[in-house]
């Protein structure tokens, strides 16, 4: 059985050492939802999920030290992405399409999101984007494929956790350790379809 999740993933770091991966899924087996994977400077990995079903599925697919079910409100307009999720307040400024984004737009979506294509380009992704994979497994017997169709730069971040300001924009470095792949080092938002094969 294969489940598909379509939407966008934002990967961003802050000068305080916190790194975030925000997933906004417009189409999924759970309906539209958003979730946040956070790693703090000490390496503690936290999942913020909107309900128990999503929390169970995501925590069985990836690895976390803490899982919290919280109310999540995430939205994107042409120039910004905002997210309120429990202790986290996040706003990301979206910039121009990257060179890679222009290349991704040349590939028809149906091909770009197919597991066969994701498997074929995985060696190139690993070579060009350190820490990034387009196929693999984080465990639990589930295989995954990431099919990217666009990429834009993130140019600024305003982030607070529990009311504490987390600083300004920084690279996603060191790579996050939730699964088999990190996001690109430079902060970006990627349009993507994730295919998960259940055992």
Image (tube, helix red, strand yellow):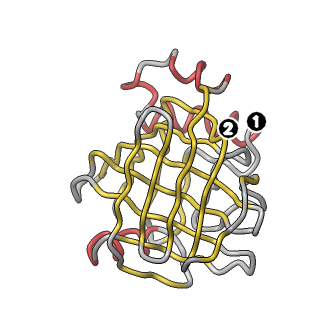
Point out the residue furthest to the bottom here.
66
Q: Vertically, is 24 above or below 85? A: above
Which of the numbered marks, if any, corresponds to residue 33? none
Q: Quadrant of residue 138?
A: bottom right
Closer to us: 8 or 168: 168
Q: What's the residue at 64%, 71% (across, down)?
A: 39
Lateral position of residue 128 relative to residue 177, left or right: right
Residue 193 x/y as whole percent: 41, 41
The residue to which callout 1 is attached is: 128
CA neighbours of label 1 inside 10 A, class few (<14), some (14 to 19), many (20+): few
* Circles 1, 2 touching at the beta carbon (< 8 Å): yes
Residue 42 x/y as whole percent: 74, 81
| SS at circle 1 | helix
Query: Which quadrant of the rendered structure holds the N terminus?
Result: bottom left
Q: What's the residue at 65%, 27% (across, down)?
A: 98
The residue to which callout 2 is attached is: 125
Query: Which quadrant of the rendered structure holds the C terminus?
Result: bottom left
Q: Quadrant of residue 84?
A: bottom left
| SS at circle 2 | helix
CA neighbours of label 2 inside 10 A, class few (<14), some (14 to 19), many (20+): some
Q: Vertically, is 123 above or below 58? A: above
Closer to us: 40 or 84: 84
Residue 114 x/y as whole percent: 41, 33
Q: What's the residue at 50%, 66% (across, down)?
A: 89
Residue 102 x/y as whole percent: 59, 19
Label 1 vs label 2: CA separation? Answer: 5 Å
Closer to us: 193 or 26: 26
């Amino acid at each position: 059985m294969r489940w598909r999740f379509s939407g966008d993933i934002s990967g961003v770091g802050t000068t305080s050492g916190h790194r975030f991966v925000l997933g906004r899924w417009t189409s999924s087996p759970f309906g539209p939802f958003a979730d946040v994977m956070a790693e703090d400077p000490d390496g503690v990995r936290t999942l913020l999920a909107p309900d128990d079903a999503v929390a169970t599925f995501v925590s069985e697919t990836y690895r976390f030290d803490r899982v919290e079910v919280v109310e999540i409100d995430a939205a994107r307009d042409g120039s910004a992405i905002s997210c309120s999720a429990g202790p986290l307040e996040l706003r990301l400024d979206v910039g121009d399409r990257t060179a890679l984004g222009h290349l991704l737009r040349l590939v028809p979506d149906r091909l770009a999101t197919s597991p066969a294509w994701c498997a074929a380009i995985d060696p190139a992704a690993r070579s060009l984007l350190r820490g990034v994979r387009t196929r693999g497994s984080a465990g639990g017997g589930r295989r995954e494929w990431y099919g990217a169709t666009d990429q834009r730069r993130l140019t600024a971040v305003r982030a607070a956790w529990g009311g504490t300001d987390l600083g300004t924009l920084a690279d996603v470095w060191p790579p996050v350790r939730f699964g088999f792949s990190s996001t690109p080092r430079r902060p970006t938002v990627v349009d993507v379809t994730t295919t998960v094969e259940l055992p």
